[in-house]
Amino acid sequence: MNKTALSFLAHPDDAEFLCAGTLIRLRDLGWQVHIATITPGDCGTMTEDRWSISARRTAEGTKAAELIGATYHCLDERDIFVVFDKPTIQKTIDLFRGIAPSLVFTHAAKDYMMDHEVVSMLARAASFSHGIPNVSVLPRPPHVVVPHLYYCDPIGGVDPYGKAVEPTTFVDVSAQTEKKAEMLAAHASQREWLRAHHGMDEYLEAMRRFSATRGKEIGVRYGEAFVQHRGHSYPENDLLAELFPV
C-alpha cells in the first residue's frame, strides 16, 4: 500500500487543531505526511497587511510541518474568497496528482465557515478524480488510487445548526498531544494575537479542551474524531480504525 497521507484544509494551523495527533501517529508508522492549505491565512491579523501576514503564516506552517518531518504546501487562494470553480478545482487536482495520497483529511462538509465547506468540496472532487488520465497535464503516478477520505471535526464538534456531529472513527492521541501543541505553538502570529486578546494561552488551551472532550468519549485523555466518506468508489474499510484500534 502507498503510505502517503494528505491533510488538505483551509488555513495554516487548521491541521494542528483538527488532525495533527493522527498525522503524528501515521508518521510514526512510516507514512509520508503532507500538510496543505488552500490559503496562506491572509486575513488572520488585525495589524498587518495581507502580504506580510501571508509570508509569516506560510513560514509558520512550514515550521510546524517540519516538526514531524512533514511537507507543507499552500495553494495561495485568498481567505474568505475560496470558491469551487474550474481554476481552483484544477489547482487542487494537480496538488493531489503530485502527491498521490492514499489517505486524505479535510474539513467537515458542514462547518461554521464557508472557506471550510468549499475546501471540503474541493478535497472530495480531487480525491475522486485526480487519477483520471485526462484530468491533469501532470504525469499520472502508477500507484494512484481513490484514497480513504475522512472529514475532521468542525470546531466545537457541531454543525452550523448546532447539531452534534456523530463521528465514525476515533483516534487516541494522548501520547501525541504535546507534540501537537508544539506544532500549534509554531503558529506564533495567531497564538500571540489570542494571548493578547484573552490574557491567557487560549490558542493551545482550546485545542486541548476539545481533544479532551473527544478523548473522554473513548475513555482516553485526548482524542481526535472523524467521519469517513463512504461514497461509491471510495474504500469501504475504516483504515484509521484498523491502524489505531481503540
Image (cartoon, rainbow, N blue to C red):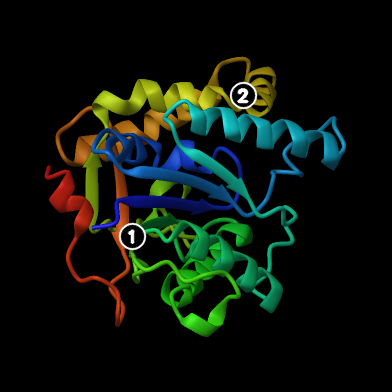
- Asked if residue 73 lies left or right of residue 144, the reply is right
Q: Which residue is mark 1?
A: 102
Give the total number of marks visible in the rendering.
2
Please say whether residue 153 is visible from this viewpoint.
no
Residue 165: x percent and y percent? 34, 57
Amino acid type, label 2: Arg
Circle nearer the N terminus (1, 2): 1
Q: Residues within 10 Å of mark 2 (few under 14, many from 20)?
A: some
Q: Along the line of sight, which residue is nearer the eye, 160 or 101?
A: 101
- Asked if residue 109 lies left or right of residue 50, the reply is left
- Which residue corresponds to the image point at 74% horizontal and 61% vertical from the top-left? 81
- Asked if residue 168 lies left or right of residue 147, the reply is left
Residue 136: x percent and y percent? 58, 76
Real-space Cα distance between discs 1 and 2?
Answer: 32 Å
Amino acid type, label 1: Ser
Q: Along the line of sight, which residue is nearer the eye, 152 or 142?
A: 142
Q: Along the line of sight, which residue is nearer the eye, 65 or 151?
A: 65
- Asked if residue 109 lies left or right of residue 201, the reply is left
- Which residue corresponds to the image point at 68% horizontal and 78% vertical from the top-left? 86
Rendered-image quadrant of the C terminus: top left
| Foreground tag (1 vs 2) | 1
Q: Which residue is mark 2?
A: 191
Q: Element type at marker 2?
A: helix
Residue 29: x percent and y percent? 23, 38
- Which residue corresponds to the image point at 14% horizontal and 34% vertical from the top-left? 219
- Position above or below: 81 against 219: below
Asked where in the image residue 166 lies, by quadrant, the reply is bottom left
Asked where in the image residue 117 lies, by quadrant, the reply is bottom right
Q: Element type at marker 1?
A: loop
Residue 106: x percent and y percent? 45, 57
